[in-house]
Amino acid sequence: MGGTLVVIVVVIVVVGWLVLTYNGLVTARNRTQEAWSEIDVELKRRHDLIPNLVNTVQGYVTHERGTLEAVTNARAAAVSAGATGDTAKIGQAENMLSQSLRSLFAVTENYPDLKAITAFTNLQETLTATEDKIEFSRRFYNGNVRDYNIKLQTLPTSLIAGALGFKQFAFFQADDADRAVPQVNFGPTSASGPPTLGSSGPPPAAGSSGPPTQS
């Protein structure tokens, strides 16, 4: 009788631990995916703003077509990368887009007439604010990824996490090269433009289906 009672108690403890562990992992995973959705929103906002920016600028910077094409191509690459859900690809593409935008804003410093256009200054301010929000969201997302991955990697949870279908998320990181201010030699005056996207996941771009894939 005593042995049976011990077995029952052990079973209850194990089942209780499994339930608590599973629920804790689900909660951490959902928080991570929710954090990614905030990045997704801001990336889509940036992607939507860029065509208007290019259209506004191209009538004034007629000799800088290469810079405008670089921004357009970088945006297309970012949208395409976002659709894959691959954090590494998304981060790299978004970093290139940030670099191309900084180069464009550096070029516009040489065009006083353009800087006096309200539509341009509004777009510039909105993009700068969006970059700030992306940076904040990136930090929040990476914090959730860190906490979630730690849960998966530590004992005893690591013994059952894989069997329960939980996988690690990748961080959304920025390349060191992207943090450096690009050297632009279009004229005597230059500017660094909007802040760098401090990252690289999911955030999916416009048209993407959801959070970054787990590894």
Image (cartoon, rainbow, N blue to C red):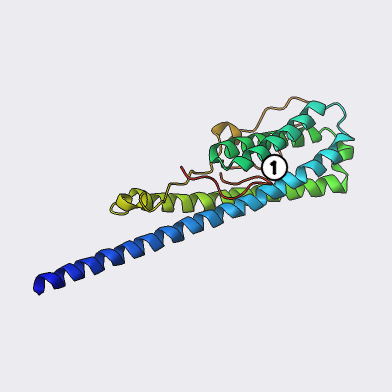
Q: Which residue type does callout 1 highlight?
A: Pro
Q: Quadrant of residue 27 in the image? A: bottom left
* Front in this rendered view, residue 130 or 150: 150
Q: Position of residue 55 (x, y in %)?
A: 85, 39
**Residue sitting at x 50%, y 58%:** 31
Q: Is residue 200 above or below residue 64?
A: below
Task: Identify the element where label 1 is drawn.
Answer: loop
Residue 195, placed above or below residue 11: above
Relative image position of residue 54 (x, y in whole percent): 81, 38
Q: 198 left or right of 155?
A: right
**Residue drawn where x is 66% and y is 53% of the image:** 41
Q: Residue at x 48, y 53 (%)?
A: 144
Residue 11 pos. (x, y %): 23, 66
Q: Nearer the viewer, residue 154 or 143?
A: 154
Q: Position of residue 7 (x, y in %)?
A: 16, 67
Q: Position of 52 compared to 40: left or right?
A: right
Q: Check disc 1 and report the residue beneath it.
A: 194
